[in-house]
Image: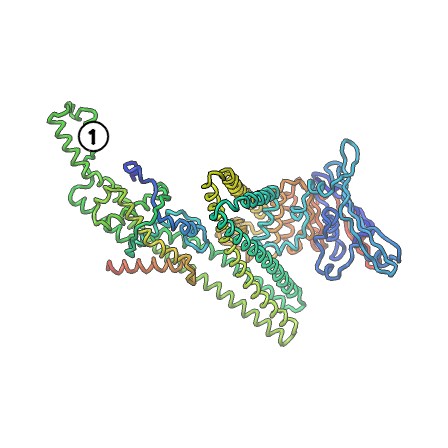
Amino acid sequence: MRIHHVKLENYRSYRDAEIKFSTSPVKNFTIIQGSNGAGKSNILNAVTWCLYGEERHLRTEDKNRQLPIINEQVYHTLMPGEQATVKVEIALGDSEIKHVISRQAKAFCQPGGEVTIREDTDPQVMFLAQGNWHQSSNPIMAIKFLLPSDISHFFFFDAEQLDEFFKEGSAKRVKKGVVDVSQISLLHQTISHLEVLHGNVRRATQGISPQTDRINRELGEVEEKLRGCKEALSTLDQNQRGIQDNLDEIQQRFRASTIEEVRRFEESRERLDGQIRDYESQLDGLREQAVACLRETGPLVYAFEAIKTTKKLIQEQVALGKLPLKIRSLFFEDLLAQGRCVCGQELAKGSDASIQIQSHLEKATQSDYLSEAETGKYVVNHILRGTSELVEKQRNLGKEIHALEGTIEETKRQLRELSEKIEKYGEINLEEIKVLEQQHVQYQEEQRKNNQEIGRKQVEEKFLGKELSRLNGELERAVKKDQKQKDLGRRLGLCTEALQALNEIRSEMLSEVRSKIQQKTEEYFLDLIWKKATYKRVSIDDNFQINVLNVRDMPSLGTLSAGERQVLALAFMAALSSISGFDAPVIIDTPTGRISGVPRENIAESLPGYLADTQVTLLMTDTEFTEPVQVRLNERIGQEYSLNFFEDDANTEVVQR
Amino acid sequence: MNTDAFPEIRNLRYSDADGEKYRQLTQDKLSPFYGSNFKDIFVYAATYGYRHGLSKELERPKPNIPISAFSEEDIWLLKSIAIADEGSLEILKDEKEQYRIAERYANGAFETIYLEVLGGKPGEPYKRMMQDVHDEFERLELDES
């Protein structure tokens, strides 16, 4: 599916514009170039507003200025009683236009001169079927079929903002990506429906016996606590996002500072923060190794004396000539069963030979247990030999952990020192810097406390979940005890089992999608990244924590440069859109905003390859769309525009090149 | 290892009341047994119990840890405990009794291990446990010298 055109009428900086996109499968790139503030992001906003009623990529300055959706010039020239229309229209299809989606807003100038804007609640969707155009009676659903809102942010995105994607709390964002792409909303709904059904069946068990009443009471209490816990977690998550936004804003201000020292300070802080994150990842890996080693070493050490005793006892048997066993009882048993000795003599019942064999058999049976000791001898020796080696390994892992913890502490100390230094600098030179840094320290402390509280609540949530499942099991057993209630017991059991099975399916699906996304992200990242000899792998673990591993298998996410992080984010987005199964157009704002020089050219060269068969629109600044980039993309560009913003009439002109 | 001779022993047992705690030890991220099997906890507890002389009869035994899950090394750790406990290889004649001895040691030490891991002591359990293993080994080395 491709965008054929976007028409903009009185939408933000566009008075009246039409952009025709390249729909060629070969020349699949459309380039829209413009300087900062020329209206590039407004194109992305126009698309998301038209489709979903949301302008998702408003820059902070636009948010702060609270500019209306209607063109500023039109807004200011509206006279009392007059009205104006804001309209965005998008035409979609493959080789020909099959869907035209439009959304409008009306601006009214009240008699007092105040302008009110009313946006349409729904867009209008026209579609081509059997050669005729029809209007969709359910435009929201129609858009959902074309490109669901949940996953649209993997197709329409601002690459510069992606830099934030892999910072603090990225696991949650990665998980959301995986959940959205898995499109398991139907499964979610089924689970919710079953939970309601389960609740109803459970309520029917009230009054059966004092025992079921007690369990139901306890279940009610646990559910109440669990609800409270979930609500608290959601509030804490919200707080965490708020704190992170505040931290980002302060860091952004430091980065954009006109004072070189302040900018350098922020760079150093980000570098140290990154190092700490990497060290902590390494520490997690070492901990895992140490714990695995402990599970192996502990039993060997604790049983060491016992093993030595076993060895000694076996050796005694060897010294006595009882080991190795010469003949086992099985041999004599076989002879007696066959009725013939190995020398050919018949072993008739009661014969002397038979009695003699019988006597050998009795003796051999008595020492049969020693055959096991014979096998044990090798295992025991192996254990004894390996124990000191394992203890040594454990000791070394302990030392490595201790050293790494020291390094983390030292890096944190450097970070604190840096923070104190900049505060002092602010004291002497610029009070604002001092205040900002104090706020930064304060927010970090809040973040730490909030994180701890989240951890505690998560443990509580897990515990209550287990308690709930234990009580449900108890209730089921109690109901089944009553012969008259067997049917109810069965229904309860069925609901519980179905819920359990669906939850397992959900988790398996997520795990499968996660692994596919990991594979695709790695493929794209290694393709796009210029330091090909530095990085080896991308991993997304069970907790949705993403990391980049270098050739020595060391986690390196924290120390990636801003440009490298952007490449990772691009790779991740490309993986999500490719896994989603939707053949949708991709629009990227400032795709190489944080990347410069040769790396930018490398990306430009790789982009067509990794986004083959996809219609791609790049909204680029002049500094991004340099000559070498143009040369590398040239063969794939089907349409090219430049945006010129005229401040006098607040209008962006779209010029085809 | 020949288990066919005593087909009645397919599973090793723990006290029924400890089942939930076994599960917690394998499911709590704080635990060194996170993601492991019950048999790993059992072997650890049995050997720890042997070393510290903690042996206790099981209450309402629950046969829930399949012998097939143990490695040959695990099995010989358990057999060695029984051999050392009896002071004779003759215990190898009675597989059932070998495992009963191991079960009693595991049962005797289980609560200590559970409390060490999830009892709420400050610090990280795996570090304390590593230190204990390290100290024990040093003691063994000292005894040797």
Above/below status of A253 relative to A657: below
Q: Is residue A182 visible?
A: no
Q: Position of residue A534 (x, y in %)?
A: 53, 52
Q: Nearer the viewer, residue A195 or A237?
A: A195
- Of the 4 image quadrants, the one containing the N terminus of chain A is top right
Q: Position of residue A362 (x, y in %)?
A: 16, 35
Secondary structure of residue under mark 1: helix
Please, which residue is most extreme toward the bottom here? A428
Q: Residues within 10 Å of mark 1 (few under 14, many from 20)?
A: some
Q: Amino acid at mark 1?
A: Glu
Displayed quadrant of residue A391: bottom left
Q: Is residue A54 visible?
A: yes
* Residue depicted at 37% across the width and 47% down the height: B39
How many numbered circles does the render carry? 1
Left or right? Give the position of A634 relative to A225. Answer: right
Please, which residue is most extreme toward the left here? A352
Above/below status of A519 relative to A81: above
Displayed quadrant of residue A163: bottom right
* Residue depicted at 61% across the width and 54% down the height: A165
The residue marked by circle 1 belongs to what chain? Answer: A
Left or right? Give the position of A184 relative to A307. Answer: right
Q: Which residue is mark 1?
A: A333
